[in-house]
Image: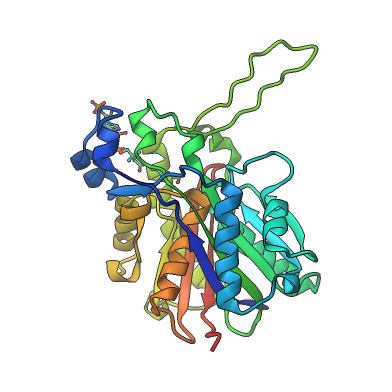
Amino acid sequence: MSIKILGTGSYLPENRVTNDDLAKLVETSDEWIASRTGIRERRIASFETTTYMAAKAGKRALKQADVCPDEIDMILVATLSGDHATPNTACQVQEIIGADKAVCMDLSAACSGFIFALNTANVYIESGLAKTVLVIGAESLSKLVDWKDRGTCVLFGDGAGAAVVTKGTGIYETVMGSNGSKGAVLTCGERKLSNLLVDTKQELEQIKMDGQEVFRFAVRTVPSCIRELLKKAGLCCEEIRYYLLHQANLRIIQSVAKRMKEPEEKFPVNVDLCGNTSSASIPILLDEWNRKGNLSQGDKIVLCGFGGGLTWGAILLEWESNK
Ligand code: UT7
């Protein structure tokens, strides 16, 4: 069983923030950020909420797919930065786009969120419970970042990406994993016990990360996850057209390419202009690559996310042209 991507869309906030802009805020430099991460600028929301960006990306994906909102029977939003605990982001997107028949839920798996959501869509489609699903990754991490912490504030950006999916005929394979015992290396948004029995000052916890530990996890886990995926699918590296990895750091992407003995050209990159947009990074990149006309009928592509949880996952799918 497989899914076909009928259309993709994305939205980036209007406001560009360069490394030089950040150097006015914390002790850093364009040279440090660019050489350690590959990031040169990122978009930061000035009026756009997570829901606003998710809905914009969703509408663009629907338009490209030529699918009406009332044909959507499920909306899945992967996010760790929704605007509310309830209503969830998916329900708010439903209201904006008018997808009245959709069942709507959010999914939280940090930077692996879009992979987990796409797999969830696949399972619902396979079971017959859904026919057409709008899958979105949307984040406004700028509201969760400690803008005094140079170790993290230079890394993240805001944005959203989306895909409309339905039953397909090509190859579809996946590998997913989680390791809760390593959760402490990347945390955000702790909601402490606070009630009539416990007097705790409630403050939203900002992003805290052991960068080196996450880096080591990424460069070890991503290649082994993709190798396992290819083995499951009975394919070799040479048969893969593109690897669309979560855009956390250019050095991670280069290291994965090297460890897999694959040319860097097979690894599209936009971390230089978007920074790390967590669950939104893969669908934003997918939309860019799709709209540039780089994906053709029958291309086998790998999508791979990794991050907080810890979580990781990869999907191999065969591109089916909608024309
Ligand atoms: O999407 C979720 C997954 N997240 C990731 O994949 C992130 C993975 N980790 C990374 O990308 C890298 O670890 C970072 C980019 C976060 C950090 O790069 P690094 O090469 O591991 O640097 P470091 O943390 O070892 O820091 C080296 C030095 C330190 O100074 P000292 O102790 O050597 O004097 C830091 O204080 O760089 C300093 N530093 C900075 N200097 C200038 C840390 N941040 C900055 C900064 N500007 N923004």
Residue nearer the viewer, 271 or 246: 271
Give the colouring mode of the picture. rainbow
Q: Which residue is drawn at 53% across and 70% down?
A: 8
Q: In this view, does 41 lie above or below 144?
A: below
Where in the figure is residue 50, as x and y percent of width and height?
Answer: 57, 47
Q: For this rendering, which residue is in front, 240 or 35?
A: 35
Q: Answer with the quarter of the image where residue 168 lies.
A: bottom right
Name the residue: 22% across, 46% down.
Answer: 35
- Count numbered badges in the picture: 0
* Residue located 30% across and 29% down the image: 25
Q: In which quarter of the image is residue 60?
A: bottom right
Task: Report the front residue among 99 and 184.
Answer: 99
281 relative position to 189: left or right = left
Q: Quadrant of the N terminus?
A: bottom right
Query: In the rendering, at what x and y percent does residue 298 appear?
Result: 49, 86
**Quadrant of res 148:** top left
Q: Quadrant of the C terminus?
A: bottom right
Q: Is residue 77 left or right of residue 298?
A: right
* Ligand 1 occupies quarter: top left
* Position in image of residue 70 (x %, y %): 75, 71
Q: Where is residue 159 in the image (x, y as percent from the top left)?
A: 48, 52
As drawn, which residue projects farthest toward the bottom?
Answer: 323
Q: In the image shown, does 55 or 229 lie closer to the viewer? A: 55
Residue 45 can be seen in this image:
yes
Q: Residue furthest front?
A: 47
Residue positioned 53% across, 37% down in the render: 182
- Up/down of 292 relative to 108, above or below: below
User: Residue extending furthest left?
Assistant: 31
Is residue 232 visible in this depiction of the protein? no
